[in-house]
Image: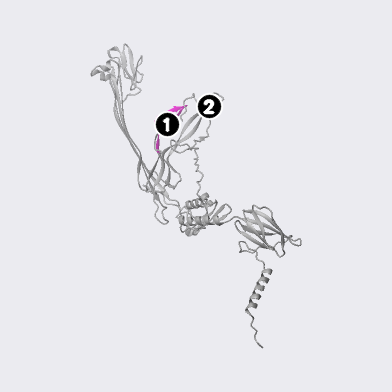
Amino acid sequence: MRNIQPHATDMIAITFLSALLIAGIFTPVVEAQTQPAPQATAESPNELFVTVGKSVLVDSEVPIERVSTGFGDVADATAVGPREVLVNGKKAGETSLIIWQQGGGKLFFDVTVRPSRFASDNRLEAVSREMKKEFPGQKISLSVENDLVFLRGTVKDLAASDRAVAIASSIGKPVNLLYVDVPKPEPQILLKVRFASVDRTLSNQLGMNLFSLGATNTLGSATTQQFSPPLVGSSTSSSSGGTSGQVGGKTGVATLSNALNLFFFRPDLNLGATIQALEAKGLLQILAEPNVLAENGKQASFLAGGEFPYPVVQGSSAGGTNAVTIQFREFGVRLNFIPTVTPRGTIQLQVAPEVSALDYTNGVTVSGFTVPGITVRNVNTEVELSEGQSFAIGGLLDNRETETLDKVPFIGDIPILGKFFQSRTRTKQNTELMVIVTPQFVRPIPAGQHVPELKYPVPFLPPNTGISMATPGVNVTGPVPVTPPTPTMPVEALIKSLQTEKPLVVSSSSGSGGGYGSGMQQTPSTAPSAPVPSAGPGPSPQ
């Protein structure tokens, strides 16, 4: 045997024929010369995808006679050979492609032209770079579908979520699918308020009432009417129960309703006098220190005092009388405030402290009811200060002097003697008030540490049992989770959890609810009571 070596020319021919054979059997159809296109038959049209600005080559096993597209603005088709059709994408949309073959065969295609992603990919990449710069260490991914931008990943807080949405909105409508780390507890703020008030009064009263029960056979009296004078008259009997004297066979009688603080009477002269000579000093000191704890941005209120009833005259009833109902108003030491921690780390306070007390000297009587007045000292303001700092938000220095002089005309002007026919009252009043507020960040007292308690001067009776009246601790009930169930949560769930609760409505058993200058909107409630007849319309103390 001998080895037959093929000639080089034969090898080239064989290689060329093999290439033609392979090309005839496997006909590639590519999009932008890369992807194969499917064959189609008249019974089952295939889908053909092309991108705007790119082309797809469709091959036919049978020579082609004619080519047609449904909508030329979306795509056009051109026969580039006896068995090849080139489809060019022009505009995003859908159309159809029909190819007629020799012998009566047809090929059907549903052509979908996709928009070019070149510009959107570049913008998406630029936005992704900005996200990494703005949120280092926070995993945020972006994906674009049509005009929608989907954000996925985890951010630290709601501010980062809002900022990421704002950045993503530059390339389309954002869809927020981010998760947020569970936030730390809000800081709690203790507000210390000190009311310091001193009221001092000095009053001098001097006056005289003269009366005669028969001196020089005369009955009468001389008074300035500032202080209650005796009532002087005559009687045939001396058993009238008052001071008496003889005048012309009759008995002069002086009835004393108020002997003031000095009383003199000379029976031999039938002459007497009632004198008011009084000096009074008054001192009122108030020191109230309410301390109230509140969460950041939440309102807190405090009241140490009571409620007093007051009548309200209603409209006339069928019998022509006025009906009177009873309402209640609060008084005492009140504090309302809302603390807000600012980005600067300071505390912004909306604060309305108040001290009120019942004042019966300025009260009124309506239909037999004595309604006291209210002395109120309140402040309603908004300040900003750091933790531990103090502000004197209210201060008052009030000095008043009142002098009243009554005298009998002409006689009261006589030197020396005229002093007996004069009455004088002088009142000096000094009021000093100061309100100081001090906020402080606080944390709960750790478990196991001593809790502040009051020191009672007199001990109570020992308890009947050694078991404390409280819910058992974790040593009995078992531990509770100290970490959230999941480290992250959806943005919308966190926003819902942070929404402000509905205001707490407190209604006492007495039917109260009205505030007296508290700086807090409250609606007075009416306690049920039977109508009380009224002597007249009268004023309604509101």
* Front residue of this view, candidates 414 and 25: 25
Place of residue 260 in the rendered image (x, y in percent of width and height, measured from the top left):
32, 25
Three-letter amino acid code at disc 1? Pro
Q: Secondary structure at mark 1?
A: strand
Q: Amino acid at mark 2?
A: Gly
Residue 540 visible, this angle: yes
Q: Quadrant of the N terminus?
A: bottom right
| Magenta stretch, overall SS | strand
As helix, strand or loop, the secondary structure at mark 2 comes to strand
Residue range (magenta): 354-373
What residue sits right under mark 1 in the picture?
372
Tell me if mark 2 has few (under 14), some (14-19) or many (20+) residues whose alpha carbon lies within 10 angstroms of its own. few
> On the image, which quarter does residue 256 sit in?
top left
> Is residue 361 inside the magenta stretch?
yes
Q: Residue furthest left?
A: 416
Residue 329 lies, in percent from the top left, at 46, 35
Q: Residues within 10 Å of mark 1 (few under 14, many from 20)?
A: some
Quarter of the figure with residue 13: bottom right
**What is the number of the mark on residue 208?**
none
| Of the pair 112 and 11, the residue shown nearer to us | 11
Q: CA distance from mark 1 to mark 2?
A: 23 Å
Q: Which residue is mark 2?
A: 315
Query: Which coloring applies here?
Result: one colour
Instruction: Tell which of 273 and 195 is nearer to you.
Output: 195
Residue nearest the observer in this picture, 245 or 211: 211
Q: Residue drawn 47% across and 36% down?
A: 514
Q: Is residue 367 above or below residue 287?
A: above
